Amino acid sequence: MIALAAIALLAVAPPAVAAPARPARDRVSIWVTAKATADRLASKEPVVFEPLAQPLEDVPTVMVDPAKTFQTIEGIGGALTDAAAETFGRLPRESQERLLTAYFDPTQGIGYSLGRTHINSCDFSSESYAYADRPGDVELRSFSIEHDRRYRLPFIKAALARAGGPVKLFASPWSAPAWMKTNGDMLHGGKVKPEYRDAWARYFVRFVLEYEQEGVPIWGLTVQNEPMATQTWESQVFTAEEERDFVRDHLGPALEKAGLSRLKLLIWDHNRGLMYQRAKVVFDDPQAARYVWGTGFHWYVGDHFENVRDVHDAWPDKQLLFTEGTPDNYDPAAVMDWRLGETYGRSLLHDLNNWAAGWSDWNVLLDERGGPNHVGNFCFAPVHGDTRTGALTFAASYFYIGHFSKFVRPGAKRVISSSNEDALLTTAFLNLDGSVVSIVMNQGEKDLDFGVWVDGRVARTKSPAHSIVTLRWSR
């Protein structure tokens, strides 16, 4: 047990994340994050493989088979919102540098490789705004991303530069401009009027082109954030049939005409519970389905992990991407609650094991209030920046995500990883460099000795209570 003062220090100090050693075939490198210890992505003494013909039934064991490969991983990361960018912009330079390194540096940080941003404002903006707010401007002559040049574009550019390699950025709209909608309001739901659907589709194109002229490449789009939710903030409703028709008749053709067919277009972008039904309506229409890369999903109403697999099994040629999740409404007393980290770990393990090709957290950074947010919808982030003092607080969720994002790199393939111990959740991946990564999470109250068994040999180590462990070796 470490002293309380040391625990307090962990809350504000920038994390010291060890760089991965070059993997070896017979030696397993280990990183651990564990509750009630000082271990946060802490590098441990390597262990070596020893012969073992077959695992024993009564000894906790994780069995990995790198020869059986599944989906290719696009990336792991989080959302670069107005709120994250504004908080970043209000921090002192030293804290900004720490934050960029912590998230985006693949060696000294956790190497985020996937990012999400928004088209027009969202709830995590300080105000509600649109890029083209002149009523009836179907030619989008008033379109301007000037608003984003103050905070969001500089933040995104700084993140991309610190990553030192590709970060796949996808964008989602919360609402069309008020003048395009049936309720005349960017907030409180409403739908895009039929006469403005073409203009709304071209709005996506304009956003992509404007961002790319700023040096920010866009990798993908979602059709609509949470299309079944009427919220007090920016929101917009599509039935499954309306989303299908908008993609088939407007958005897909607009992207194709603009030479943007390379973009990864995702439908749904809402909770796992109804994702099969929503996918079915679009993917069973060949003319709509041809424009769509995959299905995005969130975690807010139940786990329903099996629904992710059902969508893959029904349409194996389409991809799956977790596009948003945050655990709770903000409570400053609970920022360091270990449960928040375990919520991330559980979702990452199950979503990836059920064929998700990538995973994006919600806001990468929020302020000391869990904002800014123009409707008071404050929430948690893995990192909070105090805009009064400049201090950064790294929650358990930052480290839990890091056990994946740092070691499971774009292009990796998921491989078989099975456990004979209910307390140990596990997944595994084969990276392009030949390294095998096994991730093991223990939500229980007891430390567990366990082995990782691969092809007639075993490496023995420990899974502390309430911990996540990443093991890495060369195939």
Image (cartoon, rainbow, N blue to C red):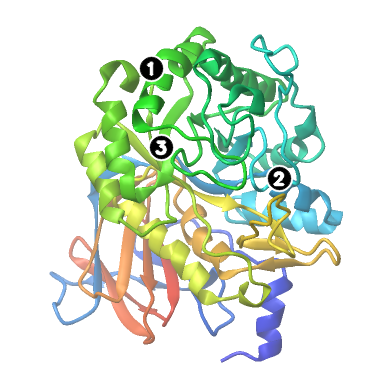
In the image, taking residue 201 as reference, residue 429 lies left or right, namely: left
Taking 45 as reference, is 319 left or right? left
Q: Would residue 475 be seen by someone viewing this image from the given angle?
A: no
Q: Residue at x 81, y 48 (%)?
A: 89
Q: Earlier in the sequence, mark 1 or mark 3?
A: 1
> Which residue is at a point 46% across and 62% down the rendered structure image?
344
Q: Which residue is mark 2?
A: 125
Along the line of sight, the residue nearer the viewer: 209 or 271:
271
Q: CA distance from mark 2 to mark 1?
A: 31 Å
Where is residue 19 shown, x and y percent of the image? 58, 59
**Kind of residue at disc 2:** Ser
- Residue 159 position in % (x across, y down): 68, 43
> Is 381 placed left or right of 57 in the picture?
right
The kind of residue on which mark 1 rests is Arg
Q: To which residue does mark 1 refer?
A: 248
Q: Secondary structure at mark 3?
A: strand
Q: Are marks 2 and 1 in contact (CB under 8 Å)?
A: no
Q: Nearer the viewer, residue 190 or 375?
A: 190
Position of 261 with respect to 442 (left or right) is right
Which class describes the residues within 10 Å of circle 3: few (<14), some (14-19), or many (20+)? many
Q: Regarding mark 1 in the picture, which secondary structure is present there?
A: helix
Q: Is residue 369 above or below residue 5?
A: above
> What amino acid is at disc 3?
Trp
Residue 343 visible to the viewer = yes
Assign the N terminus to one quadrant of the image.
bottom right
- The residue that mark 3 highlights is 268
Who comes first in sequence, dot 3 or dot 2? 2
